[in-house]
Amino acid sequence: MFRNAQKEDLDELIRLFTGAFGGTEAFAKMVMEQFAGFENVFAAQRGERLAACLCAVPVTLKEKKGAYYYGVCTDKEWQGQGIMTDLMRFAQEKLQAEGAEFAVLIPAGEALFDFYAQRGFQKAFAKRQLERKIPNNLWAVAEFDTITAKGLEALRKKYMPNSVMFRSSAYVEVLTDLYSGGLTTLSTENGYGLYFKRNERLEFIELFAKTDRDAEYLLEAARQKESVDTALVQLGRCQNLFLGEGALRDYGMIQFFGPDFDADDCYMRLMLDDE
């Protein structure tokens, strides 16, 4: 039987999620209750237990309604029996009936790109990764750790309106998770960035600016704060910063429920995926 999850399923959903992805029960509980919401979790039931689940977190892209599939997992006892294929078909039918036009996801491993391709998804939202030495600019200043969930949502709309966008409540959970993991944010009137300081390197998981020079200024301000002169920067394939630098790598996928629309100029990042 396939159905929407209920509050009474929480323990089973936590069991499935932590069994597949590890992590704490508290994180799994947050995913089900706050990030997705039970009304957006689909489950496959076999007997008294849940055999599989997926979260279909509401998102928009180019003013179209869609869903972000997260926490897609099947109990080990039921793997290889087609349950997830049927559950995804059930989810699509329900979502499409409610006006959704697409679903996006991020495969949890390289091998899963083929798995999802066989179920109607295609690669999208590739990202470009590059490493840069940061010049020492003593005059570079920025505001640090002032970006709120509402602020991040507004900045996304300003710098990349063709982004996969969560509802506001989901941005709260995303940013809370990032900050708890040591995230630092910085911003100027011409751009913003989000980064972690790891192994004497600044790892920028998001960077937007009006020009290359504005982006460089953000890196220089981060260097002044952290006393680190190397940055690893991840950019969306459609971003025009530092063109010609870095290497592309696959990241996300999209499935169209109806007619295709152009997603080549679209951006998807910071999806509670630890990247």
Image (cartoon, grey):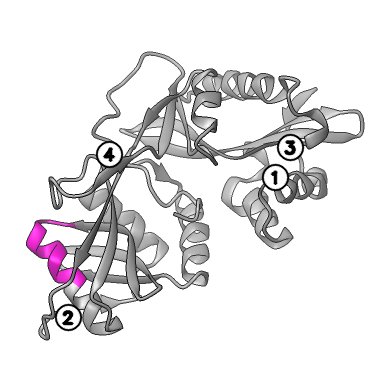
**Dot 4 and dot 3 residues touching (CB under 8 Å):** no
- Amino acid at pointer 1: Ala
Label 3, secondary structure: give it: loop
Residue at the spot 49% in from the left edge and 30% down from the top edge: 113
Q: Is residue 203 above or below residue 225?
A: above
The kind of secondary structure element at disc 4 is loop
Tell me how far mark 3 sits from mark 2, CA to CA: 48 Å
Please state the horizontal and vertical placement of residue 93, each as a whole percent of the image.
59, 18
Neighbourhood count class around disc 3 (C-alpha, 10 Å): few under 14, some 14–19, many 20 upward: many
Q: CA distance from mark 4 to mark 3?
A: 31 Å
Mark 1 highlights which residue?
Answer: 20
What kind of secondary structure does the magenta stretch mostly adopt?
helix
Mark before the other along the chain sequence, 4 or 1: 1
Task: Give how far apart the Cα atoms at labels 1 and 2 are.
Answer: 43 Å
Instruction: Determine which residue is flagged by label 3.
Output: 5
> Residue 141, image x and y in percent?
17, 80
Q: Amino acid at mark 3?
A: Ala
Query: Which residue is denoted by mark 4 in the rendering?
Result: 162
